[in-house]
Amino acid sequence: MQVDLSRFSLAGKRALVTGASRGIGQAIAIGLSQAGASVAVSARHEDGLKDTVAGLAGKGAAIAMDVADAASCRHGVDAAAKALGGLDILVNNAGMEEVRPSLDVDEELWDRILDTNLKGAFFCAQAAAKVMRAGGQGGSILNMCSLTSEIGVPTAVPYGSSKSGLLGMTRALSAEWAPLGIRVNSLGPGYFRTALTDVFYQNEGWAAAMLQKIPLQRFGKLDDLVGAAIFLSSDAASYVTGIYMPVDGGYLASI
């Protein structure tokens, strides 16, 4: 048997990446475009997407979307599909975190994190699935989970709850939407220093102790996530659905 490496290409695919103004979302959007996809990117404010759009290798579009609002999710997904002529890939990356002791968490913080990280991912996925179903070609939905989908992290209870829920949602939707040809998978980034997580790395003692727990002895770089995202979005992963893929330097395997 000869391996068809062209199945790893995203040529002709149309993708939407949420939360793509910086960090992980920006890196994945640019990576998908370099793999051949036309890519729409979204954030709450379109102006924040200029650098990402400038870095795209092919056709791109910027969409203003507040994922915490279900109507905005539907409008944003439809706008992306219109701009690209359809939709084959959705990467649910938009998310937020705020470190706070659990005894100090209030309803406002809980709702803000859960609405962004979990509710938003569901309604974006739902809107994308409707577009994919109408196109008749199926598609790929990739949810950005977290190590907190699997482990408990003190002072990150709302975030961990949202990411655990996102993993459960990934598995349920993968089973429900498989007959439509829609695959639903998730990535679990390990310790990557981004604007979202920078508060942890400012604690040098924490950073040094955490580094000792990672078998590959380094923190993640954004490029480390791009290959996994391309694979799960490509036809090379056509028999892969419902998985949680940690990209964590071996952290989960070693605890």
Image: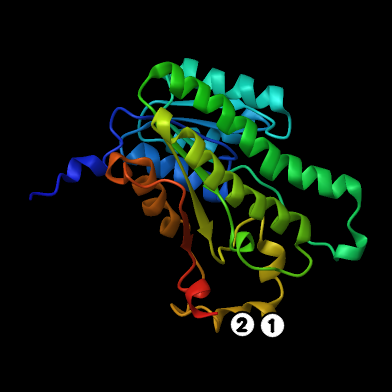
In the image, taking residue 103 as reference, residue 11 lies left or right, namely: left
Amino acid under label 2? Answer: Ala
Q: Mark 1 points at which residue?
A: 205
Q: Is residue 85 visible?
A: no
Looking at the image, residue 80 lies above or below residue 224? above
**Total residue callouts:** 2
Q: Mark 2 points at which residue?
A: 208
Measuring 42% from the left and 56% from the top, which residue is drawn there? 223
Q: Is mark 1 on a helix, strand or loop?
A: helix
Instruction: Count residues near mark 2 (Cα–Cα under 10 Å), then give few for <14, some for 14-19, many for 20+.
Output: few
The type of colouring in the image is rainbow
Are circles 2 and 1 on residues that touch, CB within 8 Å? yes
Please provide percent x and percent y for residue 226: 41, 51
Give me the C-alpha separation between circle 2 and circle 1. 5 Å
Please provide percent x and percent y for residue 124: 60, 31
In the image, taking residue 219 as reference, residue 108 lies left or right, namely: right
Image quarter for residue 151?
bottom right
Q: Which of 23 and 144 is in front in this view?
A: 144
